[in-house]
Amino acid sequence: MNLTLKVWRQKNATAPGRFEAYEAKDVLPEMSFLEMLDVVNEELMERDEEPIAFDSDCREGICGTCSLVINGIPHGGRKGATVCQLHLRHFKEGDTITIEPWRAKAFPVVRDLVVDRSAFDRIIQAGGFVSVSTGGVPDANAIPVPKADAELAMDAAQCIGCGACVAACKNASAMLFVAAKVSHLGLLPQGKVEKDRRVAKLVEAMDAEGFGNCTVTGSCEAVCPKEISLHFIARLNRDYAVAMLKGRAV
Amino acid sequence: MTLDAHIPSGPLAQKWDKHKFELKLINPANKRKFDVIVVGSGLAGASAAATLAELGYSVKCFCFQDSPRRAHSIAAQGGINAAKNYKNDGDSIYRLFYDTIKGGDFRAREANVYRLAQVSVNIIDQCVAQGVPFAREYSGYLDNRSFGGAQVSRTFYARGQTGQQLLLGAYQALCRQIGFGNVKMFPRTEMLDLVVIDGHAKGIVARDLVSGEIASHPCDAVVLATGGYGNVFFLSTNAKGCNVTATWRAYKKGAAFANPCYTQIHPTCIPVSGDHQSKLTLMSESLRNDGRVWVPKRKEDGSKSSSQIPEADRDYFLERKYPSYGNLAPRDIASRAAKEVCDERRGVGPGGLGVYLDFADAIKRLGEDKIRERYGNLFDMYEKITGENAYQTPMRIYPAMHYTMGGLWVDYNLMSNVPGLFVLGEANFSDHGANRLGASALMQGLADGYFIVPYTIGHYFASSKQAKPSISHAEFKKVEAEVRAQTQKLLSIRGKRTVTSLHRDLGRLLWEKCGMARTETSLKEALNRIPMLREEFWKDVNVTGDGCELNQNLEYAGRVADFMEFAELLCLDALHRNESCGGHFREEYQTEDGEAKRDDDHFAYVAAWGYQGPDKPPVLQKEPLVYEEVHMTQRSYK
């Protein structure tokens, strides 16, 4: 099949960007979207042109590295899939496809389709953990966890930190990402001890990074490759309110 | 080069405790004076960096990914082993130790493996305390599943994303230390060489992948946790970025490379769909708990759809050949069995390179919901890639390159023969022998990082009393200049071949000549062709752009350049080992029924290769494998 691509090209963080058109010729429906870009890049390099820079690593939907907005939708709109799990069988012969980077103030473009998501790391560094050092912990079965809580915590813990939620949000809010971490740890007895402190710290760090506010439109949930539920944002708001009401020193 | 494994004396079960007591300590107030560089942020690297920082050392951690959370440990699916015996099914530290030694086909170091089994129980405790959401039973206690090569249920899991959850636990511990200022993190920064001064590892030279800046980072000890070299085969289940560069450069600076020919082919991967394929995807081994592997009995039935082949015409070859382990035979055995039936032209799917993994019986027995609960995300993943619904038709699977047991040689302290250079996780060679059992990679990475190197590194500092290196030392300048020169060279060739096309050629050559089955002839052929391919690379590769910006093609070219050299050592090792063991299967050495035939009289040793210079063959040093506890037997899973 043949496709036309309109790809965002930008030399570096400060240079202005623009769309460039490329032809993807004789690509196959069983190729993944990224393999199609590999083919286009091979052709560009054979013509001695600079390949399109884009991030990817595991190519099986778990590392959270790949980050393309395809036709306006982060990860391309396949339910529960990252862009590396998107295959060309979902496109039609002759389609024109627009490919852009994540767009958010807190995720500056590094080059072409590559963005800097270190803001997410800084949020976790502010308190997205259980404050336990190696050693001196009880036997694993000394901390029973109700199965339902463990399952719900796991639903939240699946977040791959890709940032699609931010890219989809009109306010570039990171609430779903933060909510997932707050819920994952807050639901488990091991994480409950510092629950209030954690939620306050994470929200403070999120605001400091320049992410926007949440107006609960649900676009984050719609594009999340791990289908993390909007309910976790409700939980985050509740946990945050409780922490603030308690007014405990953080 | 002399290799001393420094295995403590005394009974096996007491070696580690005794050794821990004998290790010298560093006063807590003095620890911050020692700078440790950790390269890699997967399970081994992140756990080591976090734990060393908790102890008080000044740590710098490097990863080429944009965040330490993305290291390839994240992709491990099935689980992590631990000798907890929570199931009361007869498990023990000794049994985990024995299963691992036997699974490794008696080519691993006994004392290291025993220690691994010992600390396995601490790992689960640690991870639970961190908030890793392991699967639970209704009682609230931890659930377990079975894995290949074991007859007990000792594998802890978090759905099909155990690696992700364990890595996030280690990543969060690391983030905590970054937040405290105890670890300085360098994401998107790639180690390009090791700096050795007066025989000790004293730092690295690394490239900032965004600015292109090449800089020296001096330290008192270097910890490499840079993973395996499976991508030398081009197609593997590794992430695209996985590479041999850090360990290969360390080898060229004097660290011995051990057992490179021990490569693991995983039996359950999604088959190749065409020439465009950029990587292969694993389907967790845990699927073999409930899935049954089969092919048609007659090759004429290969073109029929699975539903048209009646039960009587199916060959459940693993159950037939290995009745006691059945579909849970170890990886090397299951892979070779699949290759065998495909060689007999009984394979299924396009090109006949596939076997069925069928869940129909399990769905009938347990219901689709139960199967969805256990493996839902794997079935979804399969559907995304192939467009097929595995609840209705059997999965098609085929073996693929997955893990590398070989790696840099280390002693009992996980220190290489270059003092001050420690090597952890898949990057070292020590614990899996010639074949790794499922759910043991996560165990080893975390054992090394949380519970071993934090003890042993202090002993090195306390006993070696080395001077602090200065960044202005001539050796740093020299290595930096070499790294710059190589980068410039790659950029200046401007040939006609893309890096990918050359890498693909190398991978295809290795898969054919040094893959699931090897022969003297095939290996000699590979050894003949690799230098030619390498020459072509350096003559005709095209790396566009320049070195002072984000240049993914340049990064890739540097990694492939090292694979081009490393491939030769891999084949040389495979050629010298005139026996079959674990993942190393030499067709000349097999039993009558086609199983790997070891030669313990001549090959019960670790083959550690030392670099001698660009035009000289490497020198082989042998570390004999002495078994004090176990008897070497022919592995049987029948």
Image: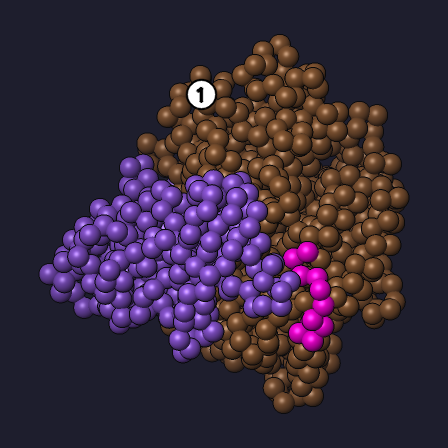
Chain colours: A purple, B brown
Viewer-nearest residue: B223 or B292: B292
Image spot of residue B153 (x, y percent): 51, 32
**Chain letter of disc 1 in the image:** B
Label 1: state its secondary structure.
Answer: helix
In the image, taking residue B130 as reference, residue B275 lies left or right, namely: right
Q: Residue at x 51, y 55 (%)?
A: A23
Viewer-nearest residue: B363 or B321: B363
- The residue tagged 1 is B363
Quarter of the figure with the N terminus of chain B:
bottom right
Q: Residue at x 84, y 47 (%)?
A: B523
Q: Residue at x 40, y 78 (%)?
A: A14
Image spot of residue B408 (x, y percent): 70, 60
Range of magenta residues: B490-501
Quarter of the figure with the C terminus of chain B:
top right
Image spot of residue B403 (x, y percent): 64, 47
Name the kind of residue labelled 1 in the image.
Answer: Ile
Extreme-front residue of the structure = A94
In the image, is residue B498 part of the stretch drawn in magenta?
yes
